[in-house]
Image (cartoon, helix red, strand yellow):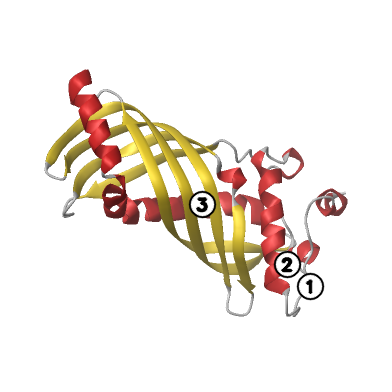
Amino acid sequence: MFVIFLATWLKACKRNDPNENNCFKEMFGGIFPHIANGIPDLGIEPFEPLGIRKISVSRNTGQVVQLNGSFNNLKIRGPSNATVAKAELNLEKKFLNFDLEIPKLRINATYNLKGNILLLPLIGAGDVNILLKEIKTSVFTKISLRKIPQEVINIDQMKVKFNVGNMRIHLDNLFNGNKVLSASFSMFLNQNSKEILAELQEDLENGLGDIFTGIWNSVYNKMPIDLWLL
């Protein structure tokens, strides 16, 4: 029953096929729409909206940004619209790498931040809304094979790199709720979004790597290799 259920949506690829990476690309791309709503039969939780409890920010020596704090209780809408641009699986060298392109991400969260951006003080805690467009993401992983009880892929380590074409951000309750200062600072943030993202990118990439390792293992650990790699 487990095999029959998976076969309705999981594309199978052949080992030692010269075009296997194209097959992996199609297979991983086909997974996203199905896990977006969750797959109860496999115990896979809904992927959309994506919930992330916390992403910490600790940047004390940046030239553009010096910030400490966190974004909390993130709800991210849009990751299920990702297109897999490239995928490469190598069981001998134990890696699984893929590139994703995401048209748009909408993020609702709360924040607690204190520091400076381009020498201007930033302090506040409240709601934050972020819109990211034209996101290109590269994911590099180290994997191992485990039997639980059938053989599955386990992601042991993940590194995420991303590039964002455009960002819009709005922070509520900046400067103790001063609406005039908050509006001016939000405009300033959006005008300098690329420089700010570049400074925060390392913290965000490290946080997302840790988070997505757990998410992807919740999927791969329930997909025996023999079902999709023939």
Q: Quadrant of residue 28?
A: bottom right
Q: How many marks?
A: 3
In the image, 176 versus 186, the foreground residue is: 186
Residue placed at 39% from the left, 51% from the top?
Answer: 207
| Within-10-Å neighbours for mark 1: few <14, some 14–19, many 20+ | few
Residue marked by disc 3: 212
In the image, 171 versus 69, the foreground residue is: 171
Relative to residue 168, is residue 146 drawn left or right?
right
In the image, 130 versus 139, the foreground residue is: 130
- Amino acid type of disc 1? Lys
Q: Secondary structure at mark 2?
A: helix
- Amino acid type of disc 3? Phe
- Measured Cα–Cα span from mark 2 to mark 1: 8 Å
Residue marked by disc 2: 23
Residue marked by disc 1: 14
- Amino acid type of disc 2? Cys
